[in-house]
Amino acid sequence: MTTTSNLKHTQLFSDAANERVNTLGQRRWGGGSATMPIKYTFEGGFPDPSTFPMEALSDVTRRVLMTDRTALNYDFVGYGGMRKVVIELERPHGGNAPKDENILITAGASQALQLVYSAFINPDDTVLLEESSYIAQQIRMWKPNVTVVPMDDDGACVDELRQTLESLASKNITPKFFYVVADFNNPLGMSYSLERRKQILDLAYEFGFMIVEDDPYGRIRFKGEYVPSFYSLDSTGQHVIRLGTVSKILGAGMRIGWAIAAPDVLNALRQFKQDGGTNPFAQRVTAEFLKDNLWSHIKVVTESYHRKRDWMLDAMTRHCGDLSSWNVPDGGIFLWVRTHDDVDDAKMLQRALEEGVAYRPGFAFSSNGGGKKFLRLAYSFQDQDSIEEGIKRLGRAMHSAAD
Ligand code: PMP
């Protein structure tokens, strides 16, 4: 009997898996190892564990289990109660409002995104991305041609976008979609103005592409009013796929998100959703909790992130203010920081990891080699003391990389 094996799994993996393992899979920025443990992570967008409503959720869980046996079965149709929560969450936008038939519940916005890629992208199709984009790396697996749209403080620059679209049209190319994070952008922290949304939607009508509007953060607003979503502004109901999630307003571990779109678009997405239905148990627990607590819980979460933003801003001013600058986001969970030119990016990242601090470097969001001198900090996860200590250490790393 053989006890050793010469089997090389890489010879059996798909080309896509090998490509990913060999290139994309090695891109880890968080660091962390036995010799370099990360104690202060500002890297991923992890929600604040102290806001998780553990008591209430355990009550709801018991109630669901005692009253609803469908919770533990396959459910290909999805739970109507969860779609009702989505409708309520969308209500403040007015305008074109989703109905039950416009909503597909997914395993987080992440799954919704993968369904969008699968349903829309053939290799070499053109997609438009914001200059620094949350999906810059992951979308590469679908092998699109990525065209990057520059941004300013009000959103994507429409003049440049029009030029890009005209130049593509002259080559008979219609982009499949423009992916935007219009509210408290990841990673930039800013939001699109109403005017900009309307102008971009007009371009979508004129040139015939979709807008994929990904909105995990729009409800986490510290001041000001909600700005109408692209979806709500789209009077045709055909041009926008709007993605949402409970990850940042309840808990990322629920893995409950959704896509809102025209029924034929959802039908195309469904063709790629081979998973026995989005976790029927989590859908029911989530919906039964949020149907009574949606806005009050959003308030709890928003207050937490507002405080944390201020703690981080204060710490940044004291520890990093002489070597970097940043935006002040009115919501969401991210600070987008630009270091001075004399700070060496690679050295700073290494020094920060040695200090036990993780953050996401700007180039991680770039599909065209940009993003240098930028970094994204999430203030959502750490408590007050850890924000202070972590930013102090980040400041040390920044200073030692500026010599
Ligand atoms: N889109 C954006 C812009 C995000 O920031 C995130 C989470 N960081 C996601 C999608 C994924 O969210 P989910 O947890 O719902 O999969």
Image (cartoon, grey):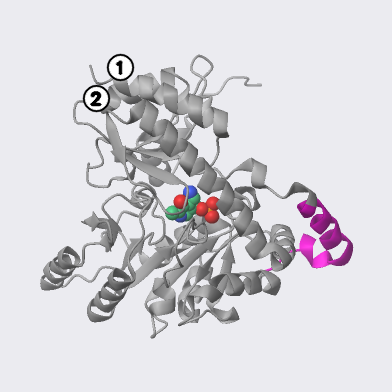
Is 69 within the magenta? Answer: yes
Residue reaching furthest to the top: 35
Is 300 within the magenta? Answer: no
Position of 343 relative to 114 (above/below): above
Report the magenta residues as a range.
56-75
- Disc with the residue nearer the chain's start (2 vs 1): 2
Per the image, label 2 sits on a secondary structure element best described as loop
Q: Nearer the viewer, residue 240 or 113?
A: 240
Asked if one can make out residue 60 in the rendered structure from this viewpoint, the answer is yes
Q: Main secondary structure of the magenta part?
A: helix
Horizontal side, residue 175 vs residue 389: left or right? left
Where residue 355 sits in the image (x, y, percent)? 44, 19
Identify which amino acid the numbered label 2 is placed on. Asp
Where residue 42 sits in the image (x, y, percent)? 47, 35
Marks 2 and 1 sit apart, C-alpha to C-alpha, by 9 Å
Horizontal side, residue 62 vs residue 320: left or right? right
Residue at the location (74% across, 65% down)?
288
Q: Nearer the viewer, residue 272 or 174?
A: 174
Identify which amino acid the numbered label 1 is placed on. Ser
Instruction: State the image quarter where residue 207 is shown.
Output: bottom left
Residue 400 badge: 1
Residue 344 badge: 2
Residue at the location (38% across, 80% down)?
234
Residue 354 badge: none
Q: Residues within 10 Å of mark 1 (few under 14, many from 20)?
A: some
Residue at the location (28% across, 20% down)?
401
Horizontal side, residue 358 vs residue 87: left or right? left
Residue at the location (39% across, 85% down)?
235
Quadrant of the rendering where the N terminus is positioned: top right
